[in-house]
Image (cartoon, coloured by chain):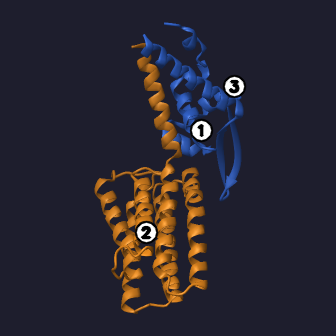
């Protein structure tokens, strides 16, 4: 088996929680912090930590605004994040194909 | 073995992406409300003997307005109950998908009724066709067979158009009954199917 694709997998995205966040955001233009938290059954602290890690890599953009006088935090994938996610999926598919071909 | 985790990862990603993109509010109450409205409109049309094009148009557009308002209120009530935003990304996507065919059907039906007389049957079929297109478009963001429901409307309207316009079968159909069947009976049936098969807890 060629270990190349596995070694190329983005370690930031590969973590379970961050992968879930990236997957949710990839299918939606933007999601609120609450929507993400409820959908992924994460704690506020856990989600904040993961989002911060993704933000530092430039994969996720966080916007803060107000809705009905209440603060609203929304997250979305950046172009870099979208590209990194697509590459991650491609590598996973490559790994699956490689193993099928064996 | 090594590919198993990759397959599982891909499956998880797919599920999460679907969950993020899909509109998952309980559809059963909305369908039943729309069906009941359709049946009431049919009853009114038949009992009051609404025969003119304008009367037909007014009655069914009124029924559509009631059904849309009811659907809006039911979806909003669910959102409040689940403490979720009503105007969520999936809701936006479903609304945007529904809008063009519904608007096109509405405008075309209206034009035909203004400039034509005695073409209520054709207008009914056009409305059924466009409604089917709208359901099919929304089906890309909704689970539970909405796309198939849309296809049924599309195929039925095309088939009936062919049969009626080419006079292949010589039988008299009241447009109110036709509308009542598609917008009343079929919605009630689909709503009942959803009620019986829907999971107890739904979220959008």
Q: Residue at x 52, y 38 (%)?
A: B17
Residue under label 1, please give it.
A25
Position in image of residue B43 (x %, y %) = 36, 84
Residue under label 3, please give it.
A57
The chain coloured orange is: B
Which element is circle 3 on? loop
Q: CA distance from mark 1 to mark 3?
A: 15 Å
Is residue B201 or residue B67 the one in the foreground?
A: B67
Position in image of residue A49 (x %, y %) = 60, 29
Q: Residue at x 60, y 68 (%)?
A: B104
Is residue B168 or residue B120 the one in the foreground?
A: B168
Position in image of residue B131 (x %, y %) = 49, 65
Which element is circle 1 on? helix
Where, quadrant-wise, is the N terminus of chain B in this rendering? top left
Q: Name the mark on residue B162.
A: 2
Q: In the rendered image of this protein, which colour is used for chain A?
A: blue
Q: CA distance from mark 2 to mark 3?
A: 59 Å
User: For residue B148, which quarter of the picture?
Assistant: bottom left
Q: CA distance from mark 2 to mark 1?
A: 45 Å
Position in image of residue A69 (x %, y %) = 67, 57
């Amino acid at each position: 088996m060629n270990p190349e694709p596995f070694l190329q997998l983005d370690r930031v995205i590969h973590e379970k929680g961050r992968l879930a966040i990236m997957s949710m955001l990839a299918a939606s233009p933007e999601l609120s912090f609450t929507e993400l938290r409820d959908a992924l059954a994460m704690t506020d602290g856990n989600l904040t930590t993961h989002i911060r890690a993704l933000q530092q890599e430039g994969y996720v953009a966080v916007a803060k605004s107000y809705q009905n006088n209440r603060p609203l935090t929304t997250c979305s994938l950046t172009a870099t994040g979208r590209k990194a996610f697509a590459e991650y999926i491609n590598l996973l598919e490559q790994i699956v194909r490689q193993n099928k071909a064996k | 073995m090594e590919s198993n985790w990759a397959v599982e990862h891909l499956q998880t990603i797919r599920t999460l992406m679907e969950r993020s993109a899909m509109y998952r509010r309980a559809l059963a109450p909305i369908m039943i409300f729309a069906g009941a409205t359709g049946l009431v409109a049919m009853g009114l049309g038949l009992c009051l003997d609404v025969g003119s094009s304008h009367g037909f148009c007014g009655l069914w557009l009124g029924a559509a307005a009631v059904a849309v308002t009811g659907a809006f209120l039911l979806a909003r009530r669910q959102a409040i109950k689940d403490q979720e935003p009503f105007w969520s990304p999936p809701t936006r996507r479903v609304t945007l998908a529904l809008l063009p065919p519904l608007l096109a059907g509405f405008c075309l039906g209206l034009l035909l009724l203004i400039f034509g007389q005695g073409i209520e049957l054709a207008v009914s079929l056009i409305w059924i066709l466009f409604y089917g297109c709208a359901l099919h478009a929304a089906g890309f963001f909704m689970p539970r067979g909405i796309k198939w429901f849309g296809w049924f409307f599309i195929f039925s309207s095309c088939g009936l158009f062919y049969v009626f316009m080419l006079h292949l079968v010589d039988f008299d159909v009241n447009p109110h009954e036709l509308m009542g069947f598609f917008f009343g009976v079929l919605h009630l049936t689909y709503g009942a199917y959803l009620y019986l098969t829907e999971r107890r807890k739904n979220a959008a």
